[in-house]
Image (cartoon, grey):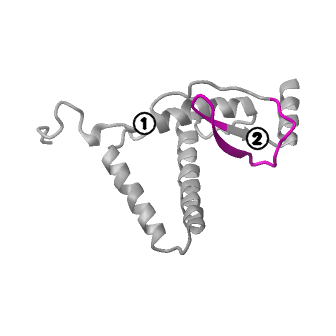
Amino acid sequence: MDTRFTRGKSSILERSLTRPKTEVSVSAFALLFSEMVQYCQSRVYSVSELQTRLADMGQSVGASMLDVLVLREKNGKRETKVLNILLFIKVNVWKSLFGKEADKLEQANDDDKTGFPAKVTAHWHKGTTLMIKFNESVIARDKALDCR
């Protein structure tokens, strides 16, 4: 095989399939994102419809990405404890999205819980904070698992 185009790197055919390079060109990402927004804009009649379509696309992409990460990092093993799930998000998911681990993981004990699947909201407090609210039954199940 002619190696003059690889510039010292291994051929793409020789690279491992299990852990591909996760870097994506910013311009390629911007083009894809722009095309997705334009595609949705051409098929809606209001801003709320556009937001809904983009959110649905994002949820689909996020779920697929999470499936891939669970297969790669955990060999398909599903976590059952809330803390382990949050640590997986802090380390693995964040690193694949932003190239580094999340800065910190905090746990707040609120009585205001929602149904499972969890409700995730973004807030600004000395940086972006994602709040994940779990159903009380999820917290109770997690405590029962800790007692085993």
Residue 39: % across, % down: 43, 68
The residue singled out by tag 2 in the image is: 133
**Vertical placement of 146 versus 20: above or below?**
above
Position above or below: 45 against 30 = below
Proximity of marks 2 and 1: CB atoms separated by less than 8 Å = no
Give the left or right position of residue 146, taking residue 69 as reference: right
Res 148 visible: no
The count of marks equals 2
The percent position of residue 135, horizontal first and vertical second, equals 83, 43
Q: In this rendering, would 61 be left or right of 148? A: left
Query: Does 146 sit above or below residue 46?
Result: above
Residue positioned 77% across, 29% down in the render:
108
**Would you identify the image quadrant in which residue 145 lies?**
top right
Q: Is residue 125 magenta?
A: yes
Going by the image, does 130 lie left or right of 28? right
State the separation of the CA atoms marked 2 and 1.
32 Å
Q: Callout 1 environment at 10 Å: few (<14), some (14 to 19), or many (20+)?
A: few
Label 2 element class: strand
Q: Which residues are magenta?
A: 109-130
The image shows residue 5 at horizontal and vertical percentages of: 14, 41
User: What residue is at 28 percent from the left and 42 percent from the top?
Assistant: 13
Quarter occupied by residue 131: top right
Which three-letter amino acid code belongs to the residue tagged 2? Lys
Residue drawn 24% across the image and 34% down it: 10
Find residue 143 and report its image quarter: top right
Left-right relation of 87 to 26: right
Q: Name the one closer to the observer, 127 or 62.
A: 127
Q: Which residue is mark 1?
A: 19
Q: Earlier in the sequence, mark 2 or mark 1?
A: 1
Q: Is 57 part of what is drawn in magenta?
A: no
Image quarter where the C terminus lies is top right
